[in-house]
Image: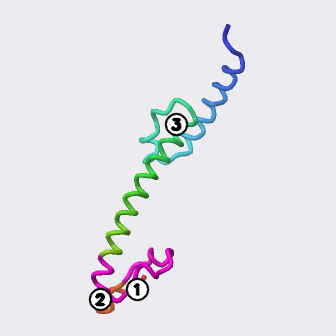
Amino acid sequence: MPNPAYKQWSDLDQQILSGLLSSMTEEILLDVVSATTSKEPWDIIRRMISSAIRAHTVQVRMDLVSTKILCPRINLRRLPPHLCLVPCVNSRSHHPRP
C-alpha cells in the first residue's frame, strides 16, 4: 500500500524544484537541470562553489608566495588573516592601488 504522505511530499518537492530551477540563471541551470529532487541543485551548487573556493585559495597562496619574493621584508606570518587577501602592489609598479 503506497504511503499517502510520500505522495504529498513528492508533489511538494517537485513544486519546490520547479521554483528553484525557474529562478536560476541559464549558466547555473545548465549544471543543475538534471536534478530530480529539490535537494540536488543545492548539493550541485555547493560542490561547484567548494571547487571554486579551493581554486581561489590556491591562487591566493601563490600570490602570497610571490608577494614574499617581491617584498621579502614583509613578515607574512605577522599579518592579520584579513590583510592576506589584500593585493600587494610593488612600490616600483606603475599600477594603481586597488
User: Circle 1 — which element?
Assistant: loop
Residue found at x 30% / y 89% = 94
Q: Residues within 10 Å of mark 3 (few under 14, many from 20)?
A: some
The first of marks 3 and 2 along the sequence is 3
Q: Which region shows up in magenta? A: 66-88
The quadrant holding residue 23 is: top right
What's the CA distance linking mark 1 and mark 2? 10 Å
User: Residue at position x 29%, y 77% from top?
Assistant: 66
- Please determine whether, in this image, residue 61 is positioned above or below residue 55: below
Circle nearer the N terminus (1, 3) = 3
Residue at the spot of label 2:
93
Tell me the quarter of the image containing the C terminus.
bottom left
**Can residue 2 be found in the magenta stretch?**
no
Please tell me how crowded label 1 is: few (under 14), some (14-19), or many (20+) other residues with Cα within 10 Å.
Answer: few
Q: Residue furthest bottom?
A: 92
**Residue 10: x, y in percent?**
63, 25
Residue under label 1 = 97
Q: Amino acid at mark 2?
A: Ser
Relative depth, front residue between 67 and 91: 67
Q: Residue at x 45, y 46 (%)?
A: 47
From the top left corner, tell me how far across and down residue 63 is, in percent: 33, 73
Q: Nearer the viewer, residue 61 or 32?
A: 61
Residue labelled with disc 3: 40
The residue sitting at the right extreme is: 5
In the rendered image, the quadrant that contains the N terminus is: top right
* x and y, in percent, of residue 44 in the image: 47, 42
**Please, what is the three-letter code of the amino acid marked with disc 1?**
Arg
Going by the image, does 24 lie left or right of 71? Answer: right
